[in-house]
Amino acid sequence: MKKLSLSTILGICAMLIGCWWVCGMVIDLSRQSLMNWKWVDFTILSIITTIPGWFAVYFGFRLIKEKSKKNIKGTVGVLAILGVLCLDVFIEWWVLPNHIGKPISFLLITIAAILLYIPVSRFLMVRVGLTPKPKGEFVGRGIISVIAVQIWLAGTEIAKIYEPKELWGIVFALYAFGPIIIAWVFHNVAMRFIKEDKAEQAEQPASSNPDPLDT
């Protein structure tokens, strides 16, 4: 019997986890819709909430068939997203004070998942004989946009602590527009660094791929 490679095992696990997520969401929404919702609401929410699970099944299957950078990053990335969603449900009110709330915990969990996603993806690429780029391989516009939105939401939550009594003036302007300005500045600065890294990588000659280890 041929031994399964590490990437193939990850693909199988991603498909199983994706199926578990889809089934769990559908069952939970079915239970709630019988009590409170209409079937139209159930259909819309089922489509939205099961998307991560379907992506896990899709990328897991693709990774089993083809060990490419896109499939590796897609599989590890969607598993990281599912992990973030699960952890957010369990610890959003346990780790941080209630006045900070869900946006802060979700932001911290997402950053931790990204920090885990990068080395795992890099390791799997090397295992199958692919050469990860030194920079700009794993963090792109999508990840930066997600973090920027979460910075905005977290900043809005923190700003509520200092909500001014009067709806005018500099203090109110900082309260109302400060979080989104901070998120906008973060997004633009991060994207500038990414573009510079991509331009630098384009100028460098491509290196030869190492021998595959994922056998």
Image (spheres, rainbow, N blue to C red):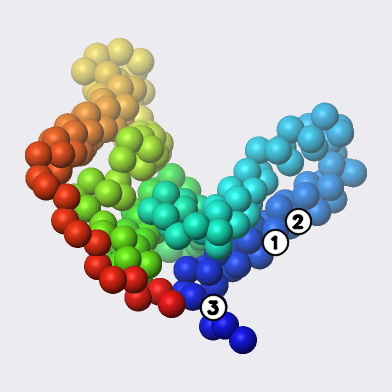
* Res. 53 in view: yes
The disc, 3 or 1, on the residue closer to the chain's N-terminal end is 3
Question: Which image quarter holds the C terminus?
Answer: bottom left
Image location of residue 109, percent across then percent down:
40, 56
Q: Amino acid at mark 3?
A: Leu
Asked where in the image residue 170 lies, by quadrant, the reply is: top left
Q: Which mark is residue 20?
A: 1
Residue type (three-letter) at the residue carrying disc 2: Cys
* Towards the viewer: 80 or 112: 80
Around disc 2, counting alpha carbons within 10 Å, would you say few (fewer than 14), some (14 to 19), or many (20 or more)? some
Residue 4 shows which numbered tag? 3
- Establish if 191 lies above or below 64: above
Spatial CA distance of label 2 from label 1 is 5 Å
User: Which residue is found at the position 37% from the left and 67% from the top?
Assistant: 128
22 vs 110, left or right, is right
Give coordinates of residue 110: x percent, y percent. Answer: 40, 52
Number of residues whose C-alpha sits closer than 10 Å to that of mark 3, classed few (under 14), some (14–19) or many (20 or more): few
Q: Is residue 163 above or below residue 12?
A: above
| Position in image of residue 203 (x %, y %) | 9, 39
Residue at 63 percent across and 54 percent down: it is: 57
204 to 209, vertically: above or below: above
Residue 116 seen in render: no
* Residue drawn at 50 percent across, 53 percent down: 78
Question: Disc 1 on helix, strand or loop?
Answer: helix
For the view shown, which residue lies furthest in the top direction? 168
- Distance of mark 3 from mark 1, alpha carbons? 22 Å
- What residue is shown with label 2? 23
The span from disc 3 to disc 2 (Cα, nearest Å) is 27 Å
Q: Along the horizontal axis of the image, is 32 left or right of 128?
A: right
